[in-house]
């Protein structure tokens, strides 16, 4: 019998009403998978030679009323905290799975990052045609880079420099149907391929080109 890694019911966690009920389901169904992925891909990213990466499974600890609409495991070269650093995420919304490199609003070097990406915009436009870009990690929507074009990419990067809450995410999405039809081997292979394509972008983001 074929063993799929994700199931449709994993994504249905985000339809459960109430903070406590949704958090219980996340902790029981999703977080064990995030921990597995965190342990595996932190080693994979550390092998890139740009620092030792550590996994951070989202705890949503500050929430007191509203249940989380998405969840993730993040990877950053820091044992404590990752939001101020460029970091990778593997996560779920109710509609899809995402694997992204994220620069979010806590990052103090957004201006420098945007300038470096503007100068090396080809590292984004040369990504495979199913790669996406987004300016807000709080929204599930994203645009295909292949459809956005250089001008809109540059506007996103300009916004990253000038708007305090601006963000920049690049990576891949899988619909919940696509994800639920992947075996563990297929999903791990897809994730590894995605990260291999994102690492050259990461090198520019952290100003490390060697």
Image (tube, rainbow, N blue to C red):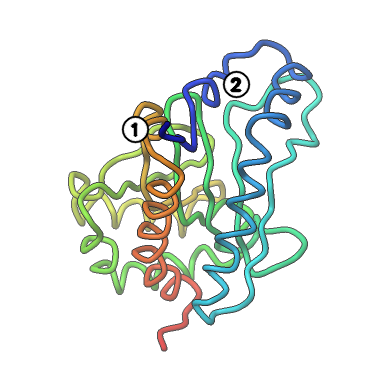
- Indicate which disc residue 61 carries: none
Is residue 82 toward the left or the right of residue 172 in the image? right
Q: Residue at x 58, y 51 (%)?
A: 37
Q: Residue at x 48, y 41 (%)?
A: 136
Q: Nearer the viewer, residue 54 or 107?
A: 54
- Tell me the quadrant of the picture where the C terminus can be found: bottom left
Residue 203 horizontal/vertical position (percent): 44, 75
Residue 122 horizontal/vertical position (percent): 23, 68
Q: Quadrant of residue 25?
A: top right
Q: Residues within 10 Å of mark 1 (few under 14, many from 20)?
A: some
Report helix, strand or loop for mark 1.
helix
- Indicate which disc residue 13 carries: 2
Counting every numbered tag in the picture gives: 2
Is residue 186 toward the left or the right of residue 91 in the image? left
Residue 149 horizontal/vertical position (percent): 18, 51
* Circle 1 residue: 178
Report helix, strand or loop for mark 2.
helix
Q: Residue furthest top?
A: 17
Q: Residue furthest bottom?
A: 210
Q: Residue at x 39, y 63 (%)?
A: 198
Q: Nearer the viewer, residue 177 or 63?
A: 177
Residue 162 horizontal/vertical position (percent): 47, 55
Q: Nearer the viewer, residue 59 or 182?
A: 182
The correct choice, above or below, for 66 with respect to 62 in the image is above
Q: Residues within 10 Å of mark 2 (few under 14, many from 20)?
A: many
Is residue 81 toward the left or the right of residue 16 in the image? right
Q: Nearer the viewer, residue 186 or 23?
A: 186
């Amino acid at each position: 019998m074929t063993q799929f890694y994700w199931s449709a019911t994993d994504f249905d966690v985000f339809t459960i009403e109430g903070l406590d009920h949704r958090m219980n389901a996340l902790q029981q169904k999703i977080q064990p998978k995030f921990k597995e992925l965190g342990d595996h891909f932190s080693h994979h990213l550390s092998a890139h030679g740009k620092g030792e990466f550590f996994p951070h499974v989202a705890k949503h600890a500050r929430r007191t009323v509203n249940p989380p609409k998405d969840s993730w495991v993040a990877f950053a070269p820091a044992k404590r905290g990752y939001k101020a650093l460029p970091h990778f995420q593997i996560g779920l919304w109710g509609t899809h799975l995402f694997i992204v490199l994220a620069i979010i609003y806590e990052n103090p070097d957004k201006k420098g990052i945007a300038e470096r990406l503007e100068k090396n915009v080809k590292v984004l436009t040369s990504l495979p045609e199913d790669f996406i870009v987004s300016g807000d990690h709080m929204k599930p929507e994203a645009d295909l880079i292949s459809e956005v074009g250089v001008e809109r990419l540059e506007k996103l990067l300009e916004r990253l420099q000038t708007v305090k809450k601006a963000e920049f995410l690049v990576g891949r999405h899988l619909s919940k149907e696509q994800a639920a039809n992947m075996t563990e081997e297929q999903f791990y292979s897809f994730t590894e391929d995605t990260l291999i394509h994102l690492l050259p972008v990461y090198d520019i983001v952290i100003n490390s080109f060697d």
